[in-house]
Image (cartoon, helix red, strand yellow):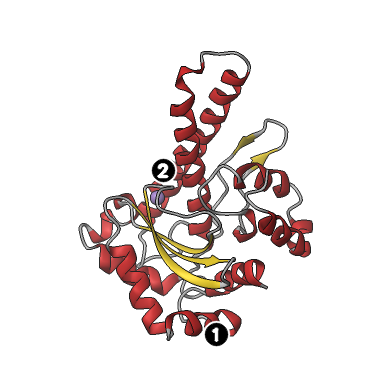
Amino acid sequence: MFASIEQEIIMNTDITRRQAITSMTATAAGVAGLASIAPASTLSTLDLGFDEKTKEYTLPDLPYDYDALAPHIDVITMTIHHTKHHAGYVKGLNNALKQLESIRNGADASTLQHWQRQLSFHAGGHINHSLFWTGMAPSNNGGGGTPSGTLAKAIERDFGSFDRFSNQFQNAAKSVEGSGWGWLIYEPMSNRLLITQMQNQQDMMFAGAIPLLGVDVWEHAYYLTYQNRRADYIAEFMKVINWKEVQRRYDAAAG
Ligand code: MN3
């Protein structure tokens, strides 16, 4: 089921996108109602790797080489993050779905709450990372700089200026308690942009929030290069943001 009628409308208005990734529609419909955030309209160059035959998710490839974001994010961090951490969320999501299916089919239901939590956590992990990779680009191929067009106008409208947005975004990400994410989101009911924090892969995000840009501030995302200097990592992340993709997500959500 869809997370909301608005999201279904958003998906249906993105006709070109839908035609380009026809296999994604069922995936999106299935996952949008499960995760705390991330309706499918915000996913772009990578879908969620849903295999229609097995009904399982697979780990999508990165849209660039593992060393493409260096020196901002090093090749070892990128490789471990994608092939171990993200892959683990895909595996966890598939397992949670399998366990819930067993319970529906008559298995002991006393673990239902555990698997519902696992579903939320791992679906969040899979969707967050799918958005994260595509929200970045190598600095010699579109990464960094500042947004333009309608997104730039919306940022000025809702935050005062790009610099004020950037400061709040970086401070919000920096001050996430423990592991989590900083997000720029679109709130459709009031037609405005907001900055939010997320704990773990799914907590503290409210219903209706459409993720446009997320920075992963789990330690595995930055520890090899930046050790405890989370703020330095976030400042470097700002240099590889794929604003063209964030603009596309904003248009899909608000256009
Ligand atoms: Mn991560």
Residue lying at the far front of the rendered structure: 190
Q: Is residue 13 left or right of residue 155?
A: right
Query: Amino acid type of disc 1?
Result: Lys
Mark 1 C-beta closer than 8 Å to ligand 1: no
Q: Is residue 104 left or right of residue 213?
A: right
Query: Amino acid type of disc 2?
Result: His
Residue lying at the far left of the rendered structure: 228
Identify the mark at residue 153; answer none if there is no mark: 1
The residue that appears at 43% across and 60% down in the rendered structure is 67
Within the image, what quadrant is residue 63 found in?
bottom right
> First in sequence: mark 2 or mark 1?
2
Residue 156 drawn above or below residue 69: below
In percent of width and height, residue 110 lies at 46, 18
Mark 2 C-beta closer than 8 Å to ligand 1: yes
In percent of width and height, residue 128 lies at 48, 52
- Residue on which the image places disc 2: 85
In percent of width and height, residue 6 lies at 67, 59
Q: What is the crowding at mark 2: few (fewer than 14 residues within 10 Å), some, or many (at least 20)? A: some
The label nearer to you, 2 versus 1, is 1
The residue that appears at 67% across and 48% down in the rendered structure is 2
Q: Secondary structure at mark 1?
A: helix
Residue 135 drawn above or below residue 91: below
In percent of width and height, residue 154 lies at 54, 80
Frontmost residue, 232 versus 112 = 112
Where does the C terminus fall, quadrant-wise? bottom right
Identify the mark at residue 250; answer none if there is no mark: none
Q: What is the crowding at mark 1: few (fewer than 14 residues within 10 Å), some, or many (at least 20)? A: some
